[in-house]
Amino acid sequence: MPKIKTHSGAKKRFKTTKSGQVKRSHAYTSHILTKKSRKRKRNLRKQEIADVTNQKQLKRLVPYK
């Protein structure tokens, strides 16, 4: 069985937890930050577990991480 190639974009954006779930960071954090509240920007910093419906596909994109 040949090795699976890792998706280059996905390996920069996703990490797996010890329990096998995929972590992701939030969008909307790079620019136009003046109109966003301090609370909103603070909450966007936190990482989140990817949705259950996307977990299988994300594990396929980043198989060895």
Image (tube, grey):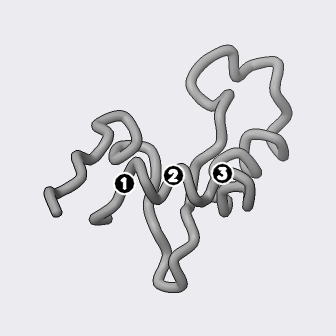
Which tag, 3 or 1, sits closer to the chain's start?
3
Residue 40 as seen in the image, left or right of residue 19: right
* Nearer to me, 11 or 64: 64
> In percent of the image, x 82 and y 41: which residue is there?
40
Report the front residue among 5 and 29. Answer: 5
Task: Bin the neighbour count of mark 3 within 10 Å (Cα to Cα): few under 14, some 14-19, many 20 and up.
Answer: few
Residue 65 horizontal/vertical position (percent): 32, 65
Disc 3 to disc 1, C-alpha distance: 12 Å
Q: Quadrant of the N terminus?
A: bottom left
Q: Identify residue for label 2.
A: 58
Q: Looking at the image, is 51 positioned above or below residue 19?
A: above
Per the image, label 3 sits on a secondary structure element best described as helix
Q: Name the secondary structure under disc 2.
A: helix
Q: Name the residue under label 3.
A: 54
Q: Is residue 25 left or right of residue 16?
A: right
Rendered residue at 57%/59% (across/down): 56
| Disc 2 from disc 1: Cα separation | 6 Å
Q: Is the Cβ of the residue at disc 2 closer than 8 Å to that at disc 1? A: yes
Dots 2 and 3: beta carbons under 8 Å?
yes
